[in-house]
Image: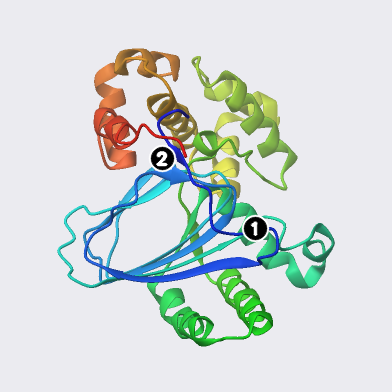
């Protein structure tokens, strides 16, 4: 994207990771992306806004997010008035964990966490408080080998906690993963036809069920109603168009499968926390690539 900074991180080919701690009064780094993973901890920043893909949320007293390769992200000042924002950033290469290691059963939860981070993930307060002491230990260690072990420990502990994905699959260009062949068949159909009208009967027929049985089945397997799922796919596509293209809001609305601009604006604000125009403005602040 021409309006998003592509950051060149300080990690060299011989480095396992990059670690930085900052105390500041304002967030100044603009929306950006990079190929490395990033674990970012922020505290004393209540009111700041975290942007990850098409997710825009206000943070509380503490915030911890893991960002996968290529996902756009930024922490904005928002209404934060703190005079001592504390930030710890860890960036590590995508090949730090080799395929052979990640295929082992013992690494299954870490592997899943890293895969989910392609959409960005955020951790709850309990998990953050549980991991904070380990972050402090990592900062104090001088031996690089033990620092790597501590990073592994941090990622493992986070992988077995409850976390929440941030960006939508459509925005992050990530395929929906499911063990159900029926759900997979339906999500693939939605991904191909979401720009058009989709009838419940069509999806039920794909799954070989009655509409009512399919609706219950889909929600049980995905924890989301089929109508909400289709809306989220359309909104993810719309958000990507708002970020990447110069299409008008009306054009984005209709090419994303919505047939009413007022409804599109209303549902976008409800789901994303801001209007399509405000969302686009967040992605238009920076015009430089480095």
Q: Which mark is residue 54?
A: 2
Q: Is residue 14 left or right of residue 37?
A: right
- Residue underneath mark 1: 93
* Mark nearer the N terminus (1 vs 2): 2
Secondary structure beneath label 1 = loop
Circle on res. 51: none
User: Label 2 neighbourhood size at 10 Å, few (<14), some (14-19), many (20+)?
Assistant: many
Q: Nearer the viewer, residue 242 or 179?
A: 242
* Left or right relative to 234: residue 94: right
- The front one of 148 and 263 is 148
x and y, in percent, of residue 257 in the image = 44, 18
CB of mark 1 within 8 Å of CB of mark 2? no
- In the rendered image, residue 238, in percent from the top left (x then y), is placed at 42, 26
Residue 49 horizontal/vertical position (percent): 28, 53
Q: What percent of the width, then of the height, locates residue 278?
A: 24, 33
255 relative to 86 in the view: left or right:
right
Using the rendered image of the protein, determine whether residue 209 is visible from the camera's viewpoint: no
Residue at the spot x=77%, y=73% of the render?
106
Q: Residue at x 27, y 70 (%)?
A: 61
Identify the residue shown where x is 78% and y is 61%: 98
In this rendering, the answer to whether 55 lies above or below 44 is above
**Element at label 2:** loop
C-alpha span from label 1 to label 2: 24 Å
Task: Choose top left, top right, bottom left or bottom right for residue 37.
Answer: bottom right
192 up-or-down from 57: above or below: above
Disc 1 versus disc 2: nearer the observer? 1
- Position above or below: 1 against 60: above
């Amino acid at each position: 994207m021409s309006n998003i900074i592509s950051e060149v991180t300080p990690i060299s080919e011989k480095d396992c990771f990059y670690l930085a701690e900052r105390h500041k009064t304002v967030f100044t780094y603009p929306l950006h992306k990079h190929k490395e993973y990033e674990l970012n901890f922020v505290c004393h920043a209540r009111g700041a806004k975290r942007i990850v893909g098409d997710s825009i949320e206000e943070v509380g007293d503490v915030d911890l997010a893991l960002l996968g390769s290529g996902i756009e992200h930024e922490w904005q000042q928002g209404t934060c008035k703190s005079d001592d924002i504390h930030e710890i950033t860890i960036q590590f290469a995508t090949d730090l964990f080799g395929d052979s290691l990640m295929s082992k059963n013992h690494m299954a939860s870490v592997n899943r966490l890293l895969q989910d981070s392609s959409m960005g993930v955020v951790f709850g307060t309990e998990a953050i408080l549980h991991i904070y002491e380990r972050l402090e230990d990592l900062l104090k260690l001088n031996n690089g080998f033990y620092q790597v072990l501590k990073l592994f420990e941090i990622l493992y502990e986070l992988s077995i906690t409850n976390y929440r994905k941030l960006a939508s699959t459509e925005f992050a260009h990530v395929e929906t993963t499911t063990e159900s062949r029926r759900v997979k068949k339906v999500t693939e159909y939605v991904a191909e036809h979401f720009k058009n009208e989709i009838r419940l009967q069509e999806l039920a027929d794909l799954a070989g069920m009655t509409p009512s049985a399919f609706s219950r089945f889909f929600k049980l397997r995905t924890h989301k109603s089929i109508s909400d799922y289709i809306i989220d796919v359309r909104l993810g596509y719309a958000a990507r168009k708002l970020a990447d293209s110069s299409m008008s809001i009306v054009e984005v609305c209709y090419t994303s499968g919505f047939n009413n601009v007022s409804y599109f604006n209303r549902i976008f604000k409800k789901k994303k926390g801001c209007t399509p125009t405000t969302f686009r403005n967040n992605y238009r602040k920076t015009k430089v690539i480095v």
